[in-house]
Image (spheres, rainbow, N blue to C red):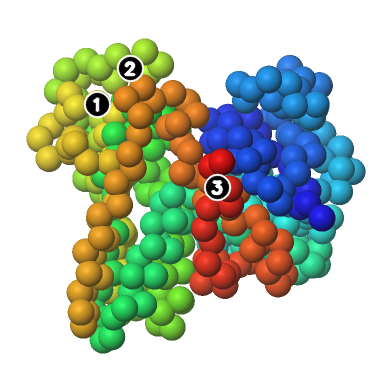
Amino acid sequence: MSIRVVQWTTGNVAANAVRAVLAHPDLELVGGYAWSADKAGRDLGELVGLDPLGVTATADVDEIIGLRPDVVLYMPLFWDVDQMVKLLEAGINVISTANFITGRSYGDADMKRLHDAAEEGGVSLYGTGISPGLANALALTVAGGVRDLERISIWEEADVSVYESEETWNALGFAQPPDTPGLAEGAKARQLVFQDAVEMMAAALGVDLDDVSHRLDLGLATEDVDLGWMKIPKGTVCGQKGVWTGTYNGRALIEIGLTWWLSDKIEDGFASDAHGHVIEVVGTPSFRVVSEILRPAMVDRVTSTAETAHAAVNAVPAVVAAGPGLVTVADLPLITAGSVAR
């Protein structure tokens, strides 16, 4: 029998998720959730740039529960723990791309609520994406060829102007003067999910970390930037470098570094031609893996976030089959492409 899937929200990532669900032979799209009332009652296909699918979007959580789906692909810009808890308690598995790996970045109280709700509902809660998510799984897999592991580093570089979400970049402090009060704290808070990822990787290695630290560097626009959907004045934040470091026995064991920029009109040391991840696994032997995202020449709202959505959709069968509670990539079997081109 097909696994019954509901798509939660209809934004950029969701547009890819719907396409991936339709392509997956074991999944059936049975519903969609839309944040705004003006989208409720409309066909989900129309909302994500497809022909009508015969699936109507709703803004009512109880209607979603009434569809009795096996899993909800939870992909909002801003998450709502109360709604997540309600879905889990109703016996619906949840796969989230909304800053979720272990839930600790939501706060210990909310993480416990979510875990308890999943156990009560007898279902699983899983967080993924490209990074954190797929990149961490790839690094842990590479480490399977190493003994006496000394360090795992994941270095991400990305021109993030393809992600047209002014709300997201404003929340991270972009387009603001670098001395804006609370900017660094706000950026760290929005990136806390990478601390989750560091701790998840350590747990997969069977290690209790001494500490997880964070460092943030800012890159400023060298001239006024107009992206069409967002303006960045000269001298304001146009790029960020953040590094999360998990230490063990006084040395860096796990590092996750992020370099994001919205324009190449930025101070030296930020923008580059790279777009992807460099993974370094140091031990006996050592590995260096370059994972580059190859995009078409013309990037639209669908192609710009495909990898994030697909990491979630392809995990659906494994998550539905998993035991109740919070699960991570270390708890699941191999996840690979769910559909093969004909």
Q: Residue at label 3? A: 340
Q: Position of residue 301 (x, y in %)?
A: 47, 26
Residue closest to the eye, 266 or 26: 26
Q: Residues within 10 Å of mark 1 (few under 14, many from 20)?
A: many
Q: Are marks 3 and 1 in contact (CB under 8 Å)?
A: no
Residue 101's disc is none
Drawn side of residue 288 relative to residue 330, left or right: left
Residue 263's disc is 1
Q: Is residue 324 above or below residue 180?
A: below
Q: Earlier in the sequence, mark 3 or mark 1?
A: 1
What amino acid type is highlighted by mark number 2? Leu
**Residue appearing at x 67%, y 59% in the figure:** 317
**Residue appearing at x 69%, y 25% in the figure:** 45
Q: Position of residue 173 (x, y in %)?
A: 35, 34
Drawn side of residue 142 relative to residue 284, left or right: right
What amino acid type is highlighted by mark number 1? Ser
Q: Are marks 1 and 2 in contact (CB under 8 Å)?
A: yes
Drawn side of residue 155 relative to residue 301, left or right: left
Residue 238 appears in the figure = yes
**Furthest residue to the left?**
268
Label 3 sits on a secondary structure element that is loop
Q: Earlier in the sequence, mark 1 or mark 2?
A: 2
Q: Position of residue 325 (x, y in %)?
A: 69, 68
Q: Position of residue 216 (x, y in %)?
A: 26, 49
Q: CA distance from mark 3 to mark 1?
A: 35 Å
State which mark lies toward you, 2 or 3.
Answer: 3
Residue 227's disc is 2
**Residue appearing at x 37%, y 18% in the figure:** 230
Label 2 sits on a secondary structure element that is loop
Residue 107 sits in quarter: bottom right
**Furthest residue to the right?**
66
Residue 141 sits in quarter: bottom left
